[in-house]
Image: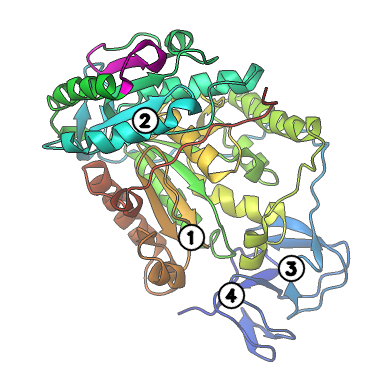
Amino acid sequence: MQEYIKIHKSDNVAVALKELQAGTGIKIGEKDILLSQTIPAGHKFAIRDIDAGGQVIKYGYPIGTAASNISSGSFIHTHNLMTALSNNITYEYKPDYTELKTMEKIYFNGYRREDTKVGIRNEIWIIPTVGCVNSVASALEKQAATLITGNIDNILAFTHPYGCSQMGEDQEYTRTILADLIRHPNAGGVLVLGLGCENSNIEELKPYIGTYDEKRVKFLTCQETEDEMEAGFALLEELAAYAHTFQREKISVDELIIGLKCGGSDGLSGITANPLAGAFSDILISRGGTTILTEVPEMFGAETILMNRCRSEKLFEKTVAMIQDFKEYYINNNQTIYENPSPGNKKGGISTLEDKSLGCTQKSGSAPVADVLAYGEMVRTKGLNLLSAPGNDLVAATALAAAGAHIVLFTTGRGTPFASPVPTVKIASNTALYEKKKNWIDFNAGILMEDKGKDELAEELFMYCLNVASGELVKSEKAGFHDMAVFKKGVTL
């Protein structure tokens, strides 16, 4: 196993892949380095002297500036490294991308809906329009468990605290995300459960849903029925009968949509799990499929890389607008734009937002940017899509599902049990996490530091995801976990 890595030839730091004790001799190329301090796994050390104010280079890009003189062999972290990001940046389109080579299409076994959309699960979803009926939705989920037979995969209630006492963008976000989920093809049937007096009641929500199949989507307003449990169960029986008509069939992978997300990152995430997700993304796109990258605040510091991979100046301008709009969101709420990374990130070895972002954007692979989506907008272009959403795990993963993702790939160096409305594949950045939390983690990227090449492991991840798309359950599904959250920006009445 490697003990340390210099990621890019121009880097002036290396990363410890295991804890390295003070006094350890390191050889980088022809240069011998003596560590003056103990370096925790995932953390950085200088491989040459760096003057105060000088750039610290990792991934081939600056991740900040030295807050003091740093000598070769010294530990580099938040105590001597500070962000170099500023609020005022002028962007210029400098196209720098190569189209991926087209690969042969392969297939998985999914569900073809009557509107021609493709799903990878045949579930029945109970979607409340407002948090006031969450308990009813959860009770119906339990009662309807008897209907999970044959090819019905599950019956799930997606509870949430939204749908009323909201104004402006928040109300629009809630209605848009709920409508997106109602239309999601992983659901063979949907019960929309309303209260009746809420802002986002069923009649208000219907225009957002648009045209729908009355056999697939049923509505129940609890205030208008004497016994909502009895009425709700009767509608779920109808939905189950309809969902039973669907069978898995052979479907080209070019119809598969995968969301890309990271959380609880560590210093190895940008070395193992995120580049692996990026290699996966390239494989899927080269076979005609689609991936979605989100977490806009975790693009800050690496955004120009994505901007220059835009296929057109129009897409470049949309990416600039996405970045600037998120910065304005911070400013309008009197918050520091670059208040990132989190305490867990720092403990794992990430020192600045540039450090985090350059690792985070590794998930995008090398494909050109095919489209840029607003929050709540659904995918319409195959290839790599950028989606406007925050870094929060539940909000961003829900946004990916709402945009049309069938599966979310979630890379992590710290671990988390959460799930999203669609199968959420947890990819560990290190073997220790994989071994410790096998009840959470589905795939181990840590073996990239041991005996596997990235291309080989990416093919294994790709085939694993095809199995998931064909019905194999991920760990969070086996545990019965499913979560959703909506982006909230404004006041609550």
The part of the image, by quadrant, that contains residue 284 is top left
Asked if 428 appears above or below 321 in the picture, the reply is: below
Which residue is the site of mark 3? 77
Badge number at residue 3: none
Q: Position of residue 310 (x, y in %)?
A: 57, 32
Q: Position of residue 181 (x, y in %)?
A: 40, 26
Q: CA distance from mark 1 to mark 3?
A: 22 Å
Badge number at residue 415: 1
Q: CA distance from mark 2 to mark 1?
A: 29 Å
Which residue is the site of mark 4? 41
Determine whether label 4 and label 1 are within 8 Å by CB: no
Rendered residue at 66%/46% (across/down)? 302
Asked if 241 appears above or below 485 in the picture, the reply is: above
Q: Residues within 10 Å of mark 2 (few under 14, many from 20)?
A: many
Element at label 1:
loop
Give the residue type that dot 2 points to: Ala
Asked if 104 appears above or below 477 in the picture, the reply is: above
Element at label 3:
loop
> What stretch of residues is rendered in magenta?
214-228
Image check: 312 left or right of 321? left
Q: Quadrant of the N terminus?
A: bottom left
Q: Residues within 10 Å of mark 1 (few under 14, many from 20)?
A: many
Pick whichever, 281 or 339, lies toward us.
339
Q: Quadrant of the C terminus?
A: top right
Pick whichever, 239 or 250, lies toward us.
239
Give the residue type that dot 1 points to: Gly
Which residue is the site of mark 2? 137
Image check: 143 left or right of 6? left
Is label 2 or label 1 in front? Answer: 2
Is label 4 or label 1 in front? Answer: 1
Q: Position of residue 9 (x, y in %)?
A: 62, 65
